[in-house]
Amino acid sequence: MRKAIIFSILLFTFLALANPILDLVENIAGARDIFIEFELVMHVKNQEQFQESSICGDLAIRNLEDFYLLIREPSVISQLSFAYISRTKRLYSSFPGYLDMENIEMSITDFMGIFQSILRIIQTPIVITKFEGDTVTINPSTLITGKSTDPVVFKIKIKDGLIQELILTNRNESEYIKIKINKISLNADVDKYFHFVR
């Protein structure tokens, strides 16, 4: 009996340590200033034809409260940026030669609540979570989808405890939305991205 308990503890510890989600949580815990270079790629069907589009940009998060988004590509909207300052509850929109501001309330607690809800859902029988190397795949179970639907599958690729790619796809992967993280810096100096709203 004692050997079985020790084996169970060791097995649980190994599985916990091998879990890339835990590596991710451990890495980002305590990080309040984050900088991300990303590419969003969409390959979706529109009236029986596939269309592909992409957006490249930068995202800066200051003190988990203020957000800055800069679009780099496509060229038609390059240099379009948005900054949200939580203290003043203001959203700034900027384009070369143009700056606009509006009052809007966005709460970081809402985002954190969504993140916590996702973690809770992953631990319930309504989803099937599968770990394959550096990829975590989250499928809705047949309890939710039945047999007649094409459920949305969510994949997270994690490398060295940081997100490398987020993928939202259908089961056969013919349609997808991918967010590729080209660079992520935790505890980064992000104040410079908010200079135009002072």
Image (tube, grey):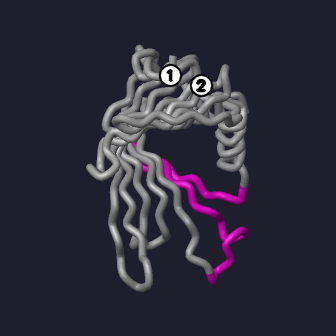
Is residue 36 found inside the magenta-colored segment of the image? Answer: no
Type of amino acid at the residue the image marks with label 1: Val
Residue name at image x 49 percent, y 37 percent: 93
**Disc number placed over residue 197 in the picture, else none:** 1
The image quadrant of residue 80 is top left
- Residue topped by disc 2: 85
Query: Measured from the top left, where is residue 122 in percent x and y?
Result: 65, 48
Q: Is residue 142 magenta?
A: yes
Residue at point 68%, 77% (across, down): 146
Disc 1 element: helix
- Mark 1 near mark 2, Cβ–Cβ under 8 Å? yes
- Quarter of the figure with the N terminus: top right
142 sits to left or right of 14: right
Is residue 22 visible from the viewing direction of this image? no
> Residue visible at 44% across and 22% down?
196
Q: Amino acid at mark 2?
A: Ile
